[in-house]
Amino acid sequence: KIDVLEKTASEITDLTGNKVHAIQADVRDAEAVRKAVDQCLDEIGLPTLIVNNAAGNFVSPTERLSPNAFKTIVEIVLLGTSNITLEIGKRLIEAQKGAAFLSISTTYADAGSGFVVPSACAKAGVNAMVRSLAAEWGRYGLRFNAIAPGAIETKGAMSRLDPSGRFYKAVINRTPAGRSGQIGELANLASYLLSDYANWLSGEVINFDGGEITYMSGQMNALSAVSKSEWDLMEKAIRSVKGS
């Protein structure tokens, strides 16, 4: 909604002293995206730092999803990202200007996950686009990366996706860092990836999850729950076996 965008733009302007322009578009609509980029070009010029962050999700048993529910998520996440990326990317190539693109993905995009199948499919496509365009359009001075955040606690996400808080607690229990991520930490990583300090970094999807995916990928990592006294008993039992 444009009123929400304008309010946010005003708040950022007041905080930073930098003029922020609010431009509205439905990313699912290629024509609306084209008009929004035209407006951006008229007001401030062609953007060179582009963040694809529009998303949608239904946490649901897949058999409960309607075809339209599946379609909606794929259109927002994958089609929306491609519409923005292609519209701006083609113009940057024509203008011979370099730029950095950053997409917000998810940790389950590459491996897949039940109960969020439309999102997993769409985000997997986003990851493939990031890697593919990094290879193809790097010659034009365009960089493409993505961040796959783990549990970042926000009011909106928690209230919609995990109203009871039970799933959130389980995630924290299997995260080696022992906590959720902070919005500021995500912003710091995004800022770095878009900055000149990351000029040689392209085609990467970075898991930003406190070690959760690494922990889950190792079959024996659950042994972190074993206490010292239990380890002592296990070692004693092993040593008691002849030939050990």
Image (spheres, rainbow, N blue to C red):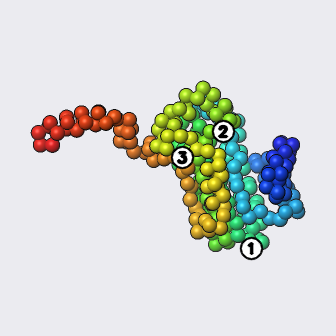
Q: What residue type is labelled 3?
A: Asp
What SS does tag 1 mark? Answer: loop
Looking at the picture, how far across and down is residue 49, in whole percent?
72, 61
Neighbor class of circle 1 (other Cα within 10 Å; few <14, some 14-19, many 20+) is few
What residue is shown at x 14% (from left), y 37% (from top)? Answer: 241
Q: What residue type is labelled 2?
A: Thr
- Quadrant location, the N terminus: top right
Decide if residue 133 is on the left or right side of residue 207. Answer: right
Looking at the picture, how far across and down is residue 37, in whole percent?
82, 58
Return the residue nearer the eye: 55 or 194. Answer: 194
- In the rendered image, the residue lying farthest to the left is 242
What residue is shown at x 66% (from left), y 38% (from top)? Answer: 154
Q: Name the residue under label 3.
A: 209
**CB contact under 8 Å: marks 2 and 3:** no
Decide if residue 79 is on the left or right side of residue 113. Answer: right
Q: In which quarter of the image is residue 48?
A: bottom right
Q: Name the residue under label 1.
A: 96
**CB contact under 8 Å: marks 3 and 1:** no
Q: Mark 2 points at which residue?
A: 154
What SS does tag 3 mark? Answer: loop
Q: Which amino acid does label 1 sit on?
A: Gln
Neighbor class of circle 3 (other Cα within 10 Å; few <14, some 14-19, many 20+) is many
